[in-house]
Image (spheres, grey):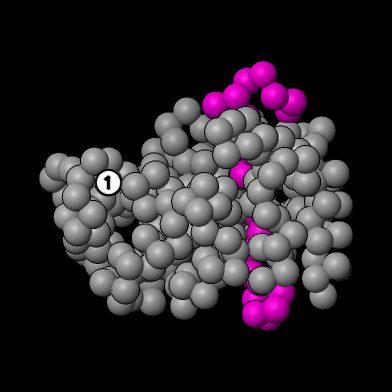
Amino acid sequence: MRLAFSTLGVPALPVDQVVRLATEHGYHGVELRASSEEPVHPGLTADERREVVDLFGRAGIEILTVASYAKVAAAGDDSPVLEEIGAALRLAADLGAAHVRVFPGGGDSPTAQADAMAARRLAAVAPLAEDLGVRVLLETHDSHRSGADVARVLGLVGHKSVGALWDVMHTWLAGEQPSVTHPVLAPYLGYVQVKDIASATDATPLPLGAGVLPLAETVEVLSRADWDGWLCWEYEKRWYPQVPDLPELLGPGRVHLSRLLLESA
């Protein structure tokens, strides 16, 4: 398995510094949060996109994902959602990223209605994703936080260019253990987001291994399945300004994940 981290942990840090952090701490890739306040977003010009590609390419660091905030199950018209995903897909293709992350965002909509909305929109963007060589990944999150929730939607879509992003925190908070989540997501799995938190009622981010999330079990389940994908550390510093900065934790975090990988081999 290869290791990445999300720029959610280093809010608005210039791209060259993100690349330096990945290189210095032994990470193979980066998940780029692509909101308007970040250095990388769909509004970049062609020249700016090439500059980002060059910075990552010269360092040998992979751009794993363009993390959009599109909500595919949200109430309202389809057009704005499809346009947002389309812009993220084109950005990802220009950057050489393999994935675009989307959220469910179904809110209080009835389950069947939210499922149908999400499936319809994901099916609509699937041909563009296939043409661009990018995969749209629906994250286990908010209204569809369990693996079973996301698998239910993806089964309705039935397209290889639409898959799942397994956020270990959300599936655990939904009451699923890794041994349950993995089998239902395995046919769709793009990669896995890891993190650690204080408790089921306190999502304050902690250094990897310092909290309650079943990271060892997750790695063990993936290893038993001979899964050779990405583990991406999402440290939600942006929403918790009081926690330590990610750069000082990146080295120990990589060591912890590497130890889990060795122990599960």
* Residue at point 62%, 44% (across, down): 234
Q: Is 25 in the magenta? A: no
Q: Is residue 153 visible?
A: yes
Q: Nearer the viewer, residue 59 or 46?
A: 59
Image-based side of 121 in relation to 101, left or right: left
Image-based side of 82 in relation to 136, left or right: left
Q: Sort mark 1 into few (<14), some (14-19) or many (20+) by Cα contacts within 10 Å.
A: many
SS category of the residue bearing label 1? loop
> Residue 260: image x %, image y %?
81, 61
* Residue at point 74%, 59% (across, down): 216
Tell me: residue 257, above or below residue 185.
above
> Residue 263: image x %, image y %?
85, 67
Specify the quadrant of the image occupied by residue 115: bottom left
Tell me: residue 139, above or below residue 236.
below
> Residue 63: image x %, image y %?
60, 55
> Residue 119: image x %, image y %?
25, 63
Disc count in the image?
Answer: 1
Task: Report the quarter where the N terminus lies.
Answer: bottom right
* Residue at point 38%, 68% (across, down): 151
Q: Which residue is mark 1?
A: 106
Task: Report the quarter where the C terminus lies.
Answer: bottom right
Specify the quadrant of the image occupied by residue 133: bottom left
Which residues are the magenta region? 222-245
Tell me: residue 181, above or below residue 89.
below
Q: Is residue 100 visible?
A: no
Q: Nearer the viewer, residue 152 or 26?
A: 152
Judged from this view, the residue extending furthest toward the left is 77
* Residue at point 43%, 51% (across, down): 145
Amino acid beneath label 1: Gly
Judged from this view, the residue extending furthest toward the top is 242
Image-based side of 121 in relation to 229, left or right: left
